[in-house]
């Protein structure tokens, strides 16, 4: 499985996501018993999207040489490998794309908007908005994420995804 978020300073390259995906497929198809391989991708596959909210049939807009490109492209490449393994080896797969998830036990310094807002509010600090404040986000509570992943795993084998897990409603932090 893939880490749900890119930790600050994660510049280890796309191999971070590709090597584990190959190991998952070997495990899923190795002993003749059919298992379901689930790839936990993220909304990063869309890069810097031109449409909001993103739908599963949108291919995204990714800068292949940008500072975060190894994370975005690594996610995209790992999804491709999952679908290729299905086509070539008949491996049962599900691909889910996790959006901004929040809930108990979030790391206070993970760099995500929800934890940043909470930490700043608890310290009585002004809330920091990056850029011009026009960015939008879709937020998903962790319990809803888990329920959605279980539902995705229980779909018929013909349904592979990708499926976006996050509410279709987007929020602008400035507008509320």
Image: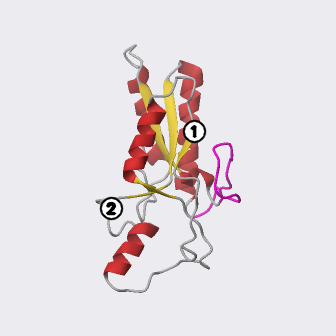
Of 10 and 106, nearer the camera is 106
Label 2 residue SS: loop
Q: What residue sits 48% from the left and 34% below the top?
A: 152
Label 1 residue SS: loop
Q: What residue sits 41% from the left and 32% below the top?
A: 24
**Mark 1 residue crowding within 10 angstroms, few (<14) / some (14–19) / many (20+):** many
Query: Any mark on residue 115, and which?
Result: none
Residue receiving disc 2: 106
| Depicted 108 relative to depicted 126: above or below | above
x and y, in percent, of residue 48 in the image: 64, 61
Q: What residue sits 70% from the left and 58% below the top?
A: 51
State the quadrant of the C terminus.
bottom right
x and y, in percent, of residue 142 in the image: 38, 52
Q: Main secondary structure of the magenta part?
A: loop
Q: Is residue 94 magenta?
A: no
| Depicted 154 relative to depicted 134: above or below | above
Asked whether, in this view, residue 60 is left or right of residue 128, the answer is right
> Which residue ends up furthest to the left in the rendered image?
105
Which comes sooner in the sequence, label 1 or label 2? Answer: 2
Of 87 and 173, nearer the camera is 173
x and y, in percent, of residue 114 in the image: 42, 67
x and y, in percent, of residue 125 in the image: 38, 86
């Amino acid at each position: 499985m893939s880490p749900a978020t890119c930790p600050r300073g994660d510049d280890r390259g796309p191999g971070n996501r590709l090597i584990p995906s190959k190991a998952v497929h070997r495990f899923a198809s190795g002993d003749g018993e059919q298992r379901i391989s689930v790839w936990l991708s993220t909304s990063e596959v869309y890069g810097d999207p031109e449409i909001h909210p993103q739908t599963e049939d949108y291919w995204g807009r990714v800068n292949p040489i940008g500072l975060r490109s190894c994370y975005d492209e690594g996610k995209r490449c790992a999804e491709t490998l999952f679908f290729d393994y299905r086509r070539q080896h008949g491996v049962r797969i599900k691909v889910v794309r996790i959006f901004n998830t929040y809930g108990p036990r979030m790391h206070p310094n993970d760099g995500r908007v929800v934890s940043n807002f909470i930490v700043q509010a608890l310290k009585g600090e002004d809330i920091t908005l990056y850029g011009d404040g026009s960015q939008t986000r879709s937020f998903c509570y962790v319990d809803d994420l888990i329920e959605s992943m279980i539902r995705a795993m229980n779909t018929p084998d013909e349904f592979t995804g990708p499926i976006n897990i996050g509410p279709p409603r987007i929020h602008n932090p400035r507008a509320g």
